[in-house]
Image (cartoon, rainbow, N blue to C red):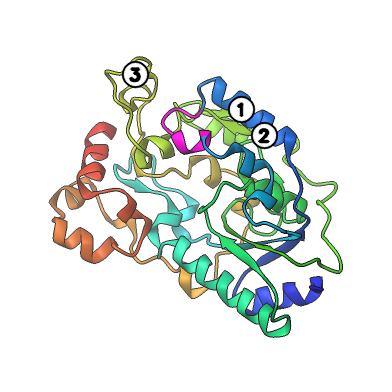
């Protein structure tokens, strides 16, 4: 049997800032909410959200025999997270300025599971970092890490929303499980709602047709397709953002008082505040590959970033 305190001890030893443990369960209400959200068109170009809804609602369909879900969080706040001057023409979300977190967190989760298997050799399971349909924020809530804020992100008391999540779904019982936090939440605060320049934030969910992060990163909508104009950046504007968006995070009171991250893996590799539109337009494909290949910017392309800059003017 797994030991709750031992899991948390090992998670901190491999570098995570937060760790909680929850039981896998069928999340019918979340599945119903997702279906309604999709039916209302909020998913726009996020076609993957329509797939495997049954697995999203039941972790045992992802990992047969699952009995424990470990949710780990790595804090990443840096100086870039504090925000940009209003007129900066080429803003990049702060998480995209460091080594791609998918690689970092997956390696950390594998190290955690290796340590657990040293003490329980028959332990089976899988690790996930945005790589499977899993209601990870809901599991983070159930594991006591925080709550889901108005901007639909996990809010933690210690580090605000500037956390990156990863999960280990394991086929062994734990001697105890965490409980959701009590007496915390966003209260009457609506700063994130007011800060979104495109009005994309609804209470605890996002209309991705208006979301700058979706428009600058995800599959682009065909403006000539029926309904496509609703997803077109020309309809709502990018407001200086060329990859991702931190508008609803930089204003959050929990984020403002959160400490800067200390883990070496989340140290920024470049500072977009020092790059203007001309710098990006003059960047060559070779330079882009050399400087940004290990960052989330590689998910985009230099051509798309340069187009986003033109759309932001």
- Comparing labels 1 and 3, the label whose residue is closer to the camera: 1
What residue do we see at 50% from left, 22% from top?
41
SS for callout 1? helix
**Is 265 left, or right, of 147 in this rendering?**
left
Q: CA distance from mark 3 to mark 2?
A: 28 Å
Q: Vertical placement of 41 versus 195: above or below? A: above
What residue do we see at 47% from left, 38% from top?
48
SS for callout 3? helix
**Is 156 left, or right, of 216 in this rendering?**
right
**Is 276 left, or right, of 180 in this rendering?**
left
Q: Position of residue 245 (x, y in %)?
A: 44, 43
Spot the residue most to the top.
226
User: Residue 15's quadrant in the figure?
Assistant: bottom right
In magenta stretch: residue 240? no
Q: Which residues are magenta?
A: 43-50
Which quarter shows the N terminus? Answer: bottom right
**Is 198 left, or right, of 235 in this rendering?**
right
What residue do we see at 73% from left, 49% from top?
141
SS for callout 2? helix
Q: Do the numbered discs 2 and 1 sit on residues whose CB atoms are within 8 Å?
A: yes
Q: Position of residue 57 (x, y in %)?
A: 67, 41
Q: Badge 3 is on which residue?
A: 229
| Label of residue 35 in the image | 1
């Amino acid at each position: 049997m797994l030991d709750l305190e031992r899991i948390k001890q090992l998670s901190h030893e491999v570098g995570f800032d937060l760790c909680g443990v929850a039981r896998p369960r069928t999340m019918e209400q979340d599945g119903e909410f997702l279906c309604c959200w999709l039916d209302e068109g909020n998913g726009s170009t996020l076609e993957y959200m329509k797939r495997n809804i049954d697995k999203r609602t039941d972790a045992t369909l992802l990992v047969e025999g699952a009995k424990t879900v470990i949710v780990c969080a790595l804090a990443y706040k840096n100086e870039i997270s504090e925000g940009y001057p209003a007129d900066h023409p080429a803003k990049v979300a702060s998480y995209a300025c460091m080594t791609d977190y998918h690689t970092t967190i997956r390696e950390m989760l594998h190290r955690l599971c290796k340590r657990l298997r040293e003490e329980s050799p028959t332990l089976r399971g899988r690790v996930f970092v945005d790589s499977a349909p899993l209601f990870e924020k809901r599991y983070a809530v159930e594991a006591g890490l925080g709550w889901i804020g108005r901007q639909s992100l996990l809010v933690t008391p210690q580090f605000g929303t500037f956390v990156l999540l990863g999960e280990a779904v394991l086929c062994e019982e734990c001697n105890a499980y965490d409980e959701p936090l009590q007496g915390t939440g966003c209260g009457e605060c609506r700063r994130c709602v007011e800060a979104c320049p495109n009005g994309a934030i609804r209470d605890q969910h996002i209309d991705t047709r208006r979301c700058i992060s979706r428009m600058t990163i995800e599959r682009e909508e065909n403006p000539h397709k029926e309904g496509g104009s609703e997803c077109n950046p020309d309809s709502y504007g990018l407001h200086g953002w060329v990859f991702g968006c931190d508008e609803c995070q930089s204003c959050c009171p929990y984020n403002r008082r959160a400490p800067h991250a200390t883990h070496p893996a989340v140290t920024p590799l470049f500072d977009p505040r020092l790059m203007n539109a001309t710098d990006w337009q003059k960047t060559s494909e070779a330079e882009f590959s050399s400087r940004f290949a290990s960052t989330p910017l590689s998910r985009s392309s230099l051509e798309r970033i340069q187009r986003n800059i033109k759309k932001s003017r």
